[in-house]
Amino acid sequence: MSAITIMLAALLVQSAPPPAAIPQEQPVSNDIVVTALPDIDAEDSLVSKQTLGSARTGSAVGSRTVFDRAQLWAKCASEPASPTRIAYLRQIFGTRTNSTKQAFAFQRLAQLTLACAPDPQAALGGRITGNPYYDRGALTIEVMKRIDPRLTLTRKQTGDPVVQARFNARETPLAKFRLPVDVRYFETAVCFVRLQPELSMQLALTDKPLDTVRRLEAAIVNRAKICVGNARRVYFDGVQFRFYIADAAYRWALATRGVDSLLPE
């Protein structure tokens, strides 16, 4: 295979699902110093500044703009300010992705946090940016930071057969309502986190500038190229790559601890 395109940018044009229905759209710390890795500028890097955010995957600027709006809300909504809010957060992250139960919990959380939303009127209907993948992705990242900004994963943990069995037992039923393209992206992220858990967790939790984020993303792909079929070039939207990695990293963290949630009761 000479090249592979991960068309995560297709997510950008999807609209949010009805709050009480399964969506029908397809989604088209201590820092680790990234050294001794194929650098994003290296000739043999699978990811380059040209392939990362390439026009092949849509507008990188547009993607970041949508995510920035979602993240402003998520920073506020992730605060476990009340038992009711915690209950909705636990339901969002502990039930089947794209299920009516998850959609209902997300809608109620959006309504509880209207003051944080970029469009309060839209938030009444459970919409933050109009794109549920970005909204959930931003919320995942901010919840992880809120739980523990030093949250870690190790390759020893993700390589443990007991942890892997626990991961599969929990995540297989929770993925029942994921749409096919979403499943493919999620499974790719699961592979990356399994092989590069330390870098993946750092990517999920970092507040570093965009250049650092890009170098982390390139390092993950370069070190785990088996996850993309040993391709020579990989194209993807960096924002979406990050929130899929965060989703997978959170679920691996649950499996390592043998729990269903990292949120307080």
Image: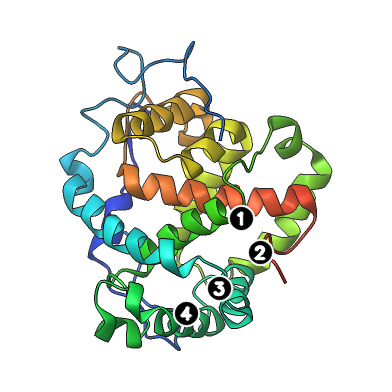
Q: Residue at x 52, y 82 (%)?
A: 105
User: Gap between marks 3 and 2, in whole Å?
Assistant: 12 Å
- In three-dimensional space, the C-alpha distance between marks 1 and 2, rounded to whole angstroms, equals 7 Å
> Label 2 vs label 4: CA separation?
15 Å
Q: What is the distance, in whole Å, between disc 4 and disc 3 at their CAs?
A: 12 Å
Q: Amino acid at mark 3?
A: Ala
Q: Which residue is more in the foreground, 33 or 21?
A: 33
Instruction: Give the side of residue 235 with respect to residue 203, left or right.
Output: left
Q: CA distance from mark 4 to mark 1?
A: 18 Å
Tell which residue pokes out farthest to the right in this image: 162
Q: Which residue is mark 1?
A: 147
> Which residue type does callout 2 highlight?
Leu
Q: Nearer the viewer, residue 128 or 156?
A: 128
Residue 235: x and y in percent read: 30, 36
Q: Disc 3 designates what residue? A: 81
Question: Which colouring convention does the figure follow?
Answer: rainbow
Percent from the top left, x then y, of residue 205? 50, 43
Considering only order in the chain, which callout, 2 or 3, is on the residue closer to the N terminus? 3
The residue wearing badge 2 is 263
For the question of whether residue 226 can be seen, the reply is: yes
Q: In the figure, 6 relative to 103: above or below?
A: above
Which mark sits nearer the N-terminus, 2 or 4?
Answer: 4
